[in-house]
Image (tube, coloured by chain):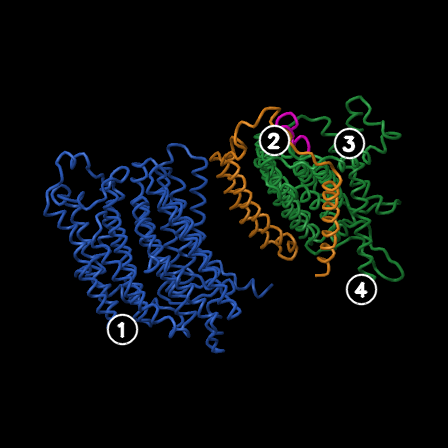
Chain colours: A orange, B green, C blue
Amino acid sequence: MSEYIHVLIMLVLAAATAGGMLVATSLIGPKKSFIDKMEPFECGESPIVSPKLRFSVKFYLVALFFVIFDIEAVYAYPWAVLFKELGLFGFIEMMIFLTILAIGLIYVWRRGALEWDR
Amino acid sequence: MWFLGFVLLLLKTAIVLTILLGLAAYLILVERKLLGRFQIRFGPNRAGPFGIWQPIADGIKMILKEDTIPQGADRVVFKYAPAVVATVAILIAAVIPFSRDAILWGYDIPMVISDLNVGLLYVLALSSLSVYGVALGGWASNSKYSLLGGIRGAAQMVSYELPLGLSLVPVVMLAGSFSLVDIVNAQACYPFVVVQPIAFVIFLIAAVAESKRLPFDLPEAENELNAGYHTEFSGMRFALYFIGEYVHMMVLGALVAVFFLGGWRGPWLPPVVWLVLKALMVPFFLIWTRATLPRLRYDQLMHFGWKLLIPIALLNILATGAVMLWLRG
Amino acid sequence: MEQVMSTINLSAIYPEIILTCFSLLILLMQSFSTPRFKEYYGYVSLVGVLAALAFVVMEPSSFFAQTVVYSFNDMWVVDNYARFFKLIFLLGTGLTILISMKYLEDEAMQYGEYFALILFATIGMMIMASAGELITLFLGLELMSLSLYVLAGYTRVRMVSNEAALKYFILGSFATGFLLYGIALIYGSTGTTSIRAVAASVGKYGLYSPGLVMGMAMLVVAFGFKAALVPFHMWTPDVYEGAPAPITAFMSAGPKAAAFAAFARVFMEGLPALQMEWTWLIWIMAALTMTIGNVIALVQDNIKRMLAYSSIAHAGYVLVAFLAAGELGISSVLYYLLTYTFMNIGAFAIITALSGRGEPRVFVRDYQGLGFQHPFAAVAMSLFLFSLAGIPPTGGFMGKFYIFSAAVKEGYIGLAVIGVVNSVVSVYYYLRVTVAMYMEEPSSVREAEAAAPIFSPALVIAIFISAYGVLSLGLFPSSYVAIVKQSFLALQ
């Protein structure tokens, strides 16, 4: 528990540093805001398209696959720590688990969900 | 008595923070000069001999710039997204062991800010958090270039999180623990790069992709997306993004050193120097590749991450397990 | 480490392992598919179902030996109760696969994932039946539910299908939330999630905390949703109507039985001490379910919706038997679920054949004149409808007889009376279809010829098996009753 307090102190100091830099800027810098400067940048033109555009569903698929395989990695970690105690039985069991998820990856790959954008 | 420990902790944290930020600032200078040399020109050399005062000049300039927030941007998120990136990058340094335990007046002082017993998971969690900085930064600016850059950046970072994580599983298998101190101690005989060359390569590549450096820097692609997700950030915010990125590079170097190159271990020189030397090899390598390689197209990037790195990382785990079991009888 | 390792008994999960291997095989076949493969998916999954069936009967010891095996540290229990339910599930799956093969070809849907998902759902149901622990139960429930959410929306081009999938998903996730909260509360009150240990701790310490009762109530909500009991039945008509007909067949039989399997195991084995609390609750739910299911079915035109409401009503009958716990009650639940599987899937098989591409012909008026054009289909449909109505000598009648005699024996005479009255009421809407088939002219002769149903051999086999099941359960019940009496719960 005490180790996490060290992390907390580091967090406080790091956040204070970053925050301090930002506060310093907002206090010291000039503040002349006029409409032409405040428009979003678009290579010199006025903004044409609404910035909240809809983006492709392929990004959603990436995030979905990431969640699934990240959970697999999360399950691989505790097994990896105890790998030496678990011996052959644990190894085969984990390989079966990884194989099932690898079959999932193969399926996703062959069905083309990893194409286009990706 | 605990007060003394607290003071020591503050001291350690302050020293690490200062050195980290200082090195990051000077790393910017080193990069510019190295890039210059790679491109057969001098880098900045006006501000002081060899441009030594350049980072300080840049810092002062950044602070004095106006603090603009574009029209229609989400004010709160816009203000704090860069801080997220910088803070997260600095926080990773909290678990890196700098040296063997120092023994002062009979007390055993660990040369690491926090010896978490789940140090490796902490590191991976923080690198996942840094995706927020990119995605939120892209979203908060009210500009479609930023949004596209932010989304692509988030998708890229998320895709390369997986090889990053999976390539560290064999390291954990060899060391038998998540704590970085234990991992360094387990490399007493030989550094892990000797037995895990593939994992080393995968980790390095994934780390390059995570820090969005060339050849993976589409999210900030200068000539495609008008500087991508940090288009609308100016002044100190912009500087914070960059400090975050450079601190991230150095911390990544330190992580490579800890996981694969033996941490602070080494003959003659003091341990801290060894760690710094090994850690600085990675930013140097990153600058070198930036000067040399072209940018990967987005679908090539994704193809590489999902179809090449992840299967290789999985096969690496299989092979490591099999060899370890076979060697033990 | 050693004591945990010794409870790993792989032979207890052979059926699930077999089904998993076959479903992964189908996924791989789909990944590397060639057009020639199309027919093989169905056969491969059938082989898998048969292999799993063989293992359920044989492992870990013969079915008739009546052994109870707790393995994986009390997480997994294999007793005759679980094995009988697994037989019901595998039967439902096999029949569904037979029905689906021609349907998939007609609707031009993707093959591989369909069968893989059906097998995944079956594995989930088998996990639910064998769960010795609440978290394992949750795992099985989610596996089954997620596969069904996708299957309900499988015909992506039809709006009703998308609507069905979305409704099922949203409401199902909500119910899962209730389940988890209930599990959490029970864990908080008893300190364990293993069903046996919950029973031990509730009984030993006489724990009667509000948390425990709240947890129990939430579990009732969750299981009530999954088994489509009133007042958690709102999803059933829309989902049954929108899903492709073979999936409706599958959903009406397997998951309902699985929900009851889990319901009975948790409440009879895990929370018998709380019987005072849930008895009146289930009484009201049973009465409401039977009544509302039957009454609303009276006014339905769409035959799939009508059968959806009728399945709600049948769940009500099962609840009556559930209430009359004890050996007679549980064995009547098992018997009724078996005959219900046969008759429901049989009815939906005929609906699948007759509904046509895109399923336009699912109304009662589309069945007019069927008796003269396709006598075989009309006879089979009438048999299944009579069985659903509970007319002797079909299996439906024996099942209801068994249930109501169990209820009367335990003293729930009021409920039995309500059940009988509801059965009589239900005869109207079942026989309405038979009347349309035999005593009315088809709407137009041209239409009737254009809409010729195609009976593939697999579908005919499925109808024969279902008819055989219904008739033998009705005419020769004693052997089934003997098997079912052996299958009551290990802990009573």
Residue B305 visible here: no
Q: Residue at x 37, y 58 (%)?
A: C225
Q: CA distance from mark 2 to mark 4?
A: 54 Å
Mark 1, secondary structure of its residue: loop
- Which residue does the numbered mark 1 point to in the structure image? C412
* Letter of the chain that mark 1 sits on in the rendering: C
Mark 4, secondary structure of its residue: helix
Question: Residue B31's mark?
Answer: 3
Specify whether residue A20 is painted magenta: no
Q: What's the residue type where badge 4 is placed? A: Trp
Q: Is residue B43 left or right of residue C236?
A: right
Q: CA distance from mark 1 to mark 3?
A: 85 Å
Q: Are marks 1 and 2 in contact (CB under 8 Å)?
A: no
Instruction: Return the residue nearer the eye: C98 or B309.
Output: B309
- Which residue does the numbered mark 4 point to in the structure image? B2
Answer above or below: position of B26 versus C402: above
Residue C179 point in image, percent of width and height:
44, 60
Residue A62 visible here: yes
Q: Is residue B60 left or right of residue C221?
A: right
Neighbourhood count class around disc 3 (C-alpha, 10 Å): few under 14, some 14–19, many 20 upward: many
Q: Are marks 4 and 1 in contact (CB under 8 Å)?
A: no
- Which residue does the numbered mark 2 point to in the structure image? A39
